């Protein structure tokens, strides 16, 4: 009996101390309640409700969204992968509840370069402003975008203008793209990419969109009608298609884009590359094995922002350019010079001076472009 009582006491002490079966009980992940739901639509509704409550309790979206990014990443659940799109809805609903104006936008934009939750929320805010924005064709919102403190956030804001114009013009693509074109060379292509992205989303009625009247469902047809913006037109096409196309290898990319040339081909290759899941190094390795004419357009789908805050990984990524065909190597260094300088807000330009001599000038040339149009970036 004394032995049994002793065992029972040890068990109580272990449970009280948070131990079970010899291991410390793990804390539940962020928003674990929603993760228990197996129906996607219900799971997303749960996430949207709890995320909105969290942001409202914080009283300050600008600082709360970076915290949510960290928690969503650390949770290692479905949340972070869904967070960008979920936050479109959360951002729109939050903006509506707080009667957001263009003048207030800069104060509530998330203070983060994270492409997940923060970028999605910021885009939702701008989408809500669509009816206010179309009166000026988007120009009234540009000062708020330009005043944001990092170039990545400025880029995201301008991309969001394309979405907002589409919502404001009730998914009428030519009106939205023409409005983007009137913003000038610095902003037109990034804005237009947002408009085309919204168009492809609207074809399946997702993200609170309505399908366009007399919709053109082929990117080969639609993007040929907008030759100036063909690269941005193609960029999100494949990832928004339902059912999704089977693109997983370099051969799939070549097959998918067969018969196209010029900007149409470059756009198709970049969009097909974006549709291939993987980390930036896997994606870059795939691009390096394509023919020289497609290797650099393929890099437009590489998620270079996944190396943010990882200087060693950024150096390794641009070093991969040494594996590219000779005719594509400088283009590779220019692209990573541009995109890595974007995600580091201008700091990677200094790294360009320290990399392999063959790539140094191209890297620096790309880095200098980071405040201009990016055209394609996820």
Image (tube, grey):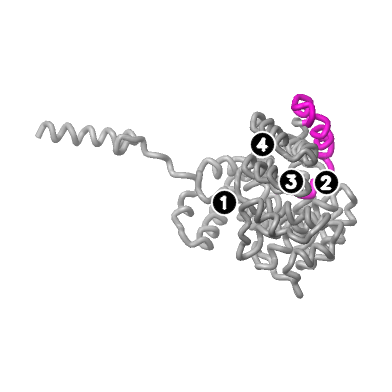
Label 2's element? loop
The picture places residue 235, in percent across and down from the top left corner, at: 73, 55
> Which residue is denoted by mark 2 in the rendering?
373
State the residue in front, 131 or 155: 155
Alpha carbon distance from label 3 to label 1: 40 Å
Comparing marks 2 and 3, which lies closer to the viewer? 3
> Which residue is denoted by mark 4 in the rendering?
308
Local crowd at mark 4 within 10 Å, few (<14), some, or many (≥20)? some
State the residue in front, 93 or 233: 233
The picture places residue 287, in percent across and down from the top left corner, at: 69, 45
> Which residue is denoted by mark 3 in the rendering?
295
State the residue in front, 163 or 324: 324
Comparing marks 1 and 4, which lies closer to the viewer? 4
Of callouts 2 and 3, the N-terminal one? 3
Boundaries of the magenta span: 349-378
Of callouts 4 and 3, the N-terminal one? 3
Local crowd at mark 2 within 10 Å, few (<14), some, or many (≥20)? some
The picture places residue 207, in percent across and down from the top left corner, at: 65, 62
Q: As drawn, which residue projects farthest toward the left? A: 1
Which of the 4 quarters of the picture holds residue 23?
A: top left
Of callouts 1 and 4, the N-terminal one? 1
> Which residue is denoted by mark 1 in the rendering?
51
Alpha carbon distance from label 4 to label 3: 23 Å
Q: Residue at x 74, y 71 (%)?
A: 212
């Amino acid at each position: 009996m004394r032995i049994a009582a002793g065992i029972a006491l040890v068990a109580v002490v272990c449970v009280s101390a948070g131990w079970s079966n010899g291991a410390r009980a793990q804390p539940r992940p962020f928003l674990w309640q929603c993760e228990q739901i197996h129906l996607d639509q219900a799971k997303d509704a749960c996430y949207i409700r709890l995320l909105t409550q969290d942001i409202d309790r914080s009283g300050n979206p600008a600082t709360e969204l970076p915290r949510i990014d960290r928690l969503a990443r650390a949770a290692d659940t479905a949340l972070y992968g869904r967070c960008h799109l979920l936050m479109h809805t959360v951002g729109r609903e939050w903006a509506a509840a707080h009667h957001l104006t263009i003048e207030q936008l800069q104060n509530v934009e998330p203070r983060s370069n994270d492409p997940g939750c923060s970028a999605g929320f910021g885009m939702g805010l701008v989408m809500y402003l669509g009816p206010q924005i179309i009166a000026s064709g988007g120009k009234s919102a540009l000062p708020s975008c330009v005043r944001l403190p990092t170039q990545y956030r400025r880029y995201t804001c301008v991309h969001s203008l394309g979405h907002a114009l589409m919502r404001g013009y009730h998914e009428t693509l030519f009106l939205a793209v023409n409005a983007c074109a009137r913003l000038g060379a610095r902003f037109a292509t990034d804005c237009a990419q947002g408009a085309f992205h919204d168009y492809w989303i609207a074809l399946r009625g997702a993200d609170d969109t309505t399908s366009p009247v007399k919709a053109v469902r082929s990117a080969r047809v639609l993007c040929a009608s907008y030759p100036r913006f063909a690269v941005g037109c193609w960029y999100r096409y494949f990832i928004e298609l339902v059912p999704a196309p089977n693109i997983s290898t370099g051969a799939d990319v070549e097959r998918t884009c067969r018969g196209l040339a010029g900007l149409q081909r470059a756009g198709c290759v970049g969009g097909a590359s974006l549709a291939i899941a993987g980390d930036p190094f896997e994606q870059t390795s795939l691009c390096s094995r394509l023919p020289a004419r497609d290797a650099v357009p393929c890099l437009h789908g590489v998620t270079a922002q996944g190396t943010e805050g990882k200087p060693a990984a950024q150096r390794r990524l641009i070093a991969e350019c040494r594996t590219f065909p000779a005719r594509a190597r400088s283009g590779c260094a220019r692209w990573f010079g541009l995109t890595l300088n974007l995600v580091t807000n201008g700091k990677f330009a200094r790294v360009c001076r320290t990399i392999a001599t063959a790539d140094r000038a191209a890297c620096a040339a790309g880095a200098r472009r980071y405040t201009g149009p990016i055209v394609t970036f996820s």
